[in-house]
Amino acid sequence: MAKEITYSDMTFPKHSSSIAISNNLTTIQKKVFNVLIYNARQTKPNSEGIYSISINQLKEHLGIPRYDKNNTHLKNRIEEIMKIVVKFDLLKKDVSVNWTAAPLLAGAQIRNGVLRYSFSQFLEEKLLDPEIFTILDLLIIQGLNSKYSIALYENVKDFSTSEFPKIPINLFRELMGVESDKYKSITDLKKRVIETSIQEINEKTDININYELIKQGRGFKYIKFNAKPSKNLNKEAYLEELNKKIDNLNKLFIGVQIMVNDKNRDIICTFQNVEYRQKKEKVVLNLKDVTGKTKLLEFNNFEDVKSTIQKNMIL
DNA sequence: TTCGTTCCACACATTCTTGG
DNA sequence: CCAAGAATGTGTGGAACGAA
């Protein structure tokens, strides 16, 4: 039987200006950037303003298994982020500044399995001392598969305490990172961008979104979103996800991440770095949470692993 | 495999144009 | 002015393909 379960929190504040950006980033780039902000808030930079995060830790936060030794893909994505310049605060939330465009990263270097990176000074003061911000949860974002889901989730979440403004569809395209020559037909934009991302957000996150397209003349010109807190996350979807991950345990023995949620808080727990070994009919999970604390959980078999975690989810 | 993108088909709705 | 037909756009379902 399980002996102990620990909980951890992976939320971080993100400045509104850096949410409403021209979103020419891919899914993985968005996730990496959020991890870098999260890490910057958790750690101190060195005297030159450079932050560090181990590649293993970065991979854990991204949900990439530790046993996946090929870091080339990740390195390429980081290099690409350095080249990306985005426009900020497209929804003009912060009236005190008029900064408009900056690169996301000033520099980055991978040496001895550690990523060292810095933000431009310009960006850093916004990112690390946000006055106008939204609390985001790395785990929730990590669970989203589409770049449009992430962009829409962050933007709508940013207005969770006030009404999301009615915006021109062109601005919506820019926020989502849909270039003007893409999805020219509103039909395809709806089907492939708006509705797919709303569906994923409503399934997997702590908010529930609906939307309205507003016509001007013959065609649609504006879009408006309404969001309300999701009463309960789709537990069945989580259970299914969880079961898949536990099945992976069977196959992979190492590097699996387990998420648990309960009724009080949507996601309360993640075990990073799950190590598994089978000894004499027993299943031992060696769990290291994000704070680095290690726990050993002993189960009689995999059914017990499943049922214990499920019990914790349905509490 | 999944995601992002582009197309196609066909029915239906709305707006524009034009001839009487 | 008005009715009919043309033009344009939406709704829905789906195929295909390259990239990740």
Image (tube, coloured by chain):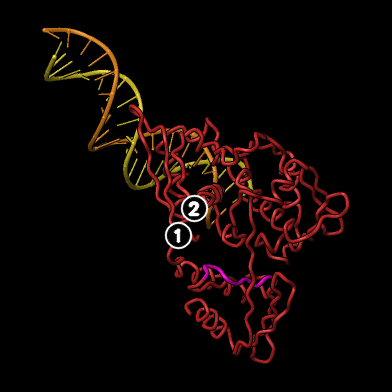
Chain colours: A red, B orange, C yellow
Part of the protein shown in magenta: A265-272
- Label 2 lies in what chain? A
**CA gap, disc 1 to disc 2?**
8 Å
Q: Outermost residue, right direction?
A: A47
Relative to A48, A313 lies left or right: left
Label 2: which secondary element: loop
Question: A25 above or below A305?
Answer: above
Residue count near mark 2 (Cα–Cα under 10 Å), binned few <14, some 14–19, many ≥20: some
Q: Does the magenta segment cover residue A84?
A: no
Task: Specify the label residue A160 is tagged with.
Answer: 2
Label 1: which secondary element: strand
Residue at image coords 80%, 58%: A44
Amino acid type shown at disc 2: Ser
Relative to A96, A49 lies left or right: right
- The residue under label 1 is A229
Tag 1–tag 2 contact (CB < 8 Å): yes
Q: Whole-percent x and y of residue A145?
A: 55, 54
Residue at image coords 38%, 33%: A220
- Label 1 lies in what chain? A
Q: Whole-percent x and y of residue A3?
A: 63, 88
Q: Earlier in the sequence, mark 1 or mark 2?
A: 2
Amino acid type shown at disc 1: Pro
Of the pair A130 and A200, the residue shown nearer to us: A130
Q: Whole-percent x and y of residue A179?
A: 55, 34
Question: A208 above or below A76?
Answer: below
